[in-house]
Image: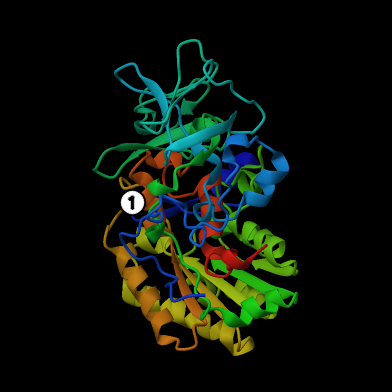
Amino acid sequence: MKILKSLLCIAMAGTMLAVAACSGGGSDSTSSGGGESASQSEKGEIDMKKFPLYDKDYENLAYDEDDYKNAMSAPYWKGNVMYNELSLPILYENGEVYAKLYYTPTKVFAVKDQKLEKTYEEDKDYVVDKENKKLVIPKGSSIPALYEKADEGENPPEGFAYTTGIPNNIDLYTIWNLGTGNFVYTESAYFYGKYLSVSYAYDVEDLDTSVFAKYDATTLTAVRNKLKNGEEISLVTIGDSITEGCSSTGDNLHVAPNTPCYAKQIKTELERVYGAKVKLTNIGKGGSESKWPLSGEGSAALGKAKEAAPDLCIIAYGMNDSSSQVSPVAYDDNIRSIIREIKNVSENCEFILVNSFPCNPLYERDATLFDGYLKKLNKIAAEDEGGHIVVADMQKVGKYYMQTKKYCEISSSNVNHPNDFLHRVYAMNIVSTICDYKNIK
């Protein structure tokens, strides 16, 4: 059955397999701007309006499972605490072994394995290098490392075998090359089995908040008011394998720590924040492009979405459109048609349009397409004068993380599926457009 599920995670694109399927109050703009970093007041104090989730008592933080569950989908960049950032301990060719962090740690309070079952010991298993934003893995550590070029297929981890066919999600991997270099594709624990889950307080001066979606009190007012009033809302998510939940440990891989896909996390976070019930209908389909809901094959799924009479609809396409080199014009037509179909049955529905997180640069067919899709999404939102449509740009977020880490540290397939951390960030970025964390107690 696991092999069958892995087979469903593959779709043809040209002469190469395109991995895309999976079973299993203010004037801030919702689309990200540029060059906006975290700042402090002239006295050096934290601007709590910018960081409403800031924990002043971070020196006394200790890992607590309930705290993590509450923080799982809350935007970490609205505070100073990161739970379970996924990082690979890498053995570099010069003999050094370390795992990179996105931000300068002011206190590391837990380092666990990917399953969140084993806790590693500071100074014995790792040493915190604050200045260089990394965990150094000393000799004798019980933390297993991945060879620097394992993502290219060199010196793969023990227990995994190469196949020229379609790899299963147990112990196989394959190597692809589109003419720009070798890269591994797998749905197995080849990468994710080596992840460290690092929880730490960090220096907010390191944050570039411009890459994340912003809260705007003038947008999505209908759904927000319903949530504030404690009314049940209907949430529909439409998209490809990312929306379906591919590479999430909870909805696809079915291994610890069983992190839900981003769609389920959005439901949970909205319920946690507002105390209202959210009914989720997820029609994400692996391998699908933006035209799929409008096709005969996707008509039943679209019918299910329409039957749900959504108050909020999230549309997230682009990864497979890009692989198939769908033009921005055709993509725009498809997204507009999906919106019309939903509004025909749910006139007051509001929409969040998601620009997909990046694929592996070595897998990318046309580097201009995602930018073209984003321009079309922004235009759709701008044309809606009532603020009922906003955009969340995950492409920019993913590229922000790739400035620090390897692609396989945000994608456990190493091709185009987000890992648990990125599923969490998908949810965080999307709920940022809805929830006013400054005024949530």
Residue furthest front in the image: 43
Res 15 seen here: yes
In the rendered image, which quarter contains the C terminus? bottom right
Q: Residue 177, position in %: x, y?
A: 30, 40
Q: How is the image coloured?
A: rainbow
352, above or below 162, in the image? below
26, above or below 440, in the image? below
Q: Look at 42% across and 38% down and name the residue there.
A: 104
Instruction: Find residue 225 and report its image quarter.
Output: bottom right
Q: Look at 75% across and 69% down and name the residue there.
A: 277
Q: Nearer the viewer, residue 311 or 48?
A: 48
Q: Residue 34, position in %: x, y?
A: 31, 62
In the rendered image, which quarter contains the N terminus? top right
Q: Residue 105, position in %: x, y?
A: 46, 36
Res 310 seen here: no
Q: Look at 69% across and 75% down and name the residue there.
A: 228
Provide the secondary structure element on which disc 1 rests.
loop
Q: Residue 72, position in %: x, y?
A: 62, 49
Q: Nearer the viewer, residue 428 or 350?
A: 428
Residue furthest top in the image: 140
Q: Look at 53% across and 22% down and name the residue there.
A: 159
List the residue tagged with mark 1: 15
Residue furthest left in the image: 179
Q: Nearer the viewer, residue 350 or 316?
A: 350
Instruction: Find residue 299 and report its image quarter.
Output: bottom right
Q: Amino acid at mark 1?
A: Thr
